[in-house]
Amino acid sequence: MLNKVSVDDIDVRGKKVLVRCDFNVPLADGAITDDTRIVASLPTINKLVEGGGRVILCSHLGKPKGTVKPELSLKPVAERLSELLGKEVRFAADPEVTGPNAKAASEAMQDGDVILLENTRFRKEEEKNEDNFSQELAALCDVYVNDAFGTAHRAHCSNVGVTKYVPTAAVGYLMQREIEFLGNAVDNPARPFAAVLGGSKVSSKISVINNLLEKVDILIIGGGMAYTFIKAQGGSIGNSLVEEDYIEYAKEMVEKAKAKGVKMLLPTDTVVADRFDNEANSKVVPSGEIPEGWMGVDIGPETIAAFSAAVSEAKTVVWNGPMGVFEMENFAAGTRAMAEALANADAVTVIGGGDSAAAVNQMGYGDKMTHISTGGGASLEFLEGKVLPGVAAATDKGRRKIIAGNWKMNKTPSEALALIEMLKPLVAGADADVVFCVPAIDIIPAVSAVKGTNIHIGAENMYFEESGAYTGEISPAMLTDAGAEYVIIGHSERRGYFAETDETVNKKVLKAFEHGLIPIICCGESLTQREQGITIEWVRQQIKIAFLGVNADQAKTAVIAYEPIWAIGTGKVATDEQAEEVCCAIRKCIEDIYDTDTAAAIRIQYGGSVTGASAAGLFAMPDIDGGLVGGASLKEDFGKIVNYDK
Ligand code: PGA
């Protein structure tokens, strides 16, 4: 689950709100032939208008590839929107999109007004996500809202770049609905969870199959891609579609399904045709016995019965890709039967965009589905388990990144000064909070050395008592008096070598807050725990105990560092997805303890062999808000890490 700032969380009165919509509608002779996407954008626009915002809409349309193509102007959309909203939507005709006409139109706006900018892809920078156009877009507004799910799998200026330059970014209702339905279906499905995959190519669904096999109970494969699977199992498929290069992969997937206990259903009978034509001769044959000269064009009646029965058992069904050549009426029966089976199922049904969405709508079952995604490519990437750049950019904006060095037991006071001098210019331009957590004895000289810079100083540990007979320990007041602002608590090295427990971590966290120190609270699993599959359970437990007695206001300011022990100092950095999975689970845990606001505010770092090379990928993850860096914090590379986004 992603934490989002939604349009419900922002006050837009009197503010200019730039809304990225998906107005990429089909046009014929300058007229809009299907306004579904425009209609889908209305709830967000209405909400912003009602809230007194000055609403500046933008979108791309078609593929003008950076040139001004009058036939791809958004003007007809402004007209249709005016009708649908029942109020004037002024079209800011401007070939530069953000040029003088757009500026003048936005300056002339009153609260509640709506204008639409020209096609963002008239600008060549758009698809390259180049900074100048992102900045120009940002300069038009005070608040940015992304409601264009259909474009969320692309990183372009109008949906990703712009978020770097706006103070507040949020997601609109359409985007929120897509994330919720697709996200919940895949991550928290009511079970049995069935996925129905079709369409012509295995190659375009590789990652989807692989990812869904980790999550579903039933995997149904139909459509053109099924023949590659049938051939992989030794069947004859005549002239049917096949991807020879994916036969091995198909075999592996069948094995994986077995190993995971997933019930995988393939067609057992097939409608075959003697040519690719609605009027071709056709007959039904067993799937593995397609004669030469014939090609599979739809699933057969026995398969329809088996697939429909499996769907009717499920409590969650995700469908992507038709079962046959549904564009030809004579070969649409399989796709129609699946649409009907989903419509009748007592289940959450989610249609993953593209052809299957078109088929469901065309066959009249649209209103029987729980959710039909407006994004083709975007929903596919979502089902692949990928983080969509457009979603990530609009959702993690509220949290400033924080990148902290953990010097560990390195650097004497004089060495510390030399290191700070070396790093100062390298970290100077960072668009993130930069913290050096240094050995206790280095704190005082470090604090004076960083005066007037963007560097903050933290400690690596402290004791939980105020003062007294604790030989060798450092108290919280000593840290604050010395000028430290942060303190690392519960690092795995302290847990491992100095017998720190979850309970002492909790006592220290409480003391840190009492003294106005920001704790960087560490958690993470060992390799054995990861191999046992108990990572998330373990980390949740650590977090729950660490936060006992901490109130929500305090928790909002805390920093958590997720540091898998097997990655610390080993050079074995977690993959972006591994790190994101746990950081996302930590955020969910904070939401369970407190509430969504606290979960949205708390910053979660990843730590463990972070380098200049791995930082950008890790920090782009929606739930990773920076890093806790050991080895690389003592080197020039730290400059690269804090400037990961440059
Ligand atoms: P590392 O250490 O970056 O050297 O792996 C991270 C840490 O221990 O905080």
Image (cartoon, helix red, strand yellow):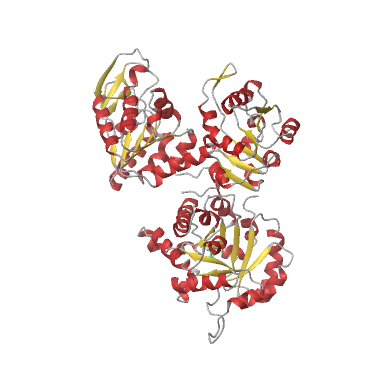
State whether residue 442 is above or below residue 564: below
Report the residue at 70% width, 36% height from top.
110
User: Relative to residue 269, is residue 19 depicted above or below?
Assistant: below
Q: Is residue 447 left or right of residue 255?
A: right
- Point out residue 401 in the picture as x, y percentages from the top left corner: 60, 56
Q: Which quadrant of the view contains residue 17?
A: top right
| Residue in front for this viewpoint, 282 or 114 | 114
Q: Residue furthest top?
A: 279
Residue 373 in the image: state x and y as whole percent.
45, 34
Residue 200 visible in the shown view: no
Whether residue 93 is visible: yes
Q: Nearer the viewer, residue 193 or 644?
A: 193
Viewer-closest of 631 and 432: 432
Tell me the quarter of the picture where residue 258 sits: top left
| Image coords of residue 548 (percent x, y) | 46, 68
Q: Is residue 139 above or below residue 444?
A: above
| In this picture, residue 119 sits left or right of residue 178 | right
Report the number of numbered marks: 0
> Residue 136: where, in percent of width, then height?
70, 39
Tell me the residue at 61%/55% (across/down). 400
- Depicted 332 relative to depicted 308: above or below: above
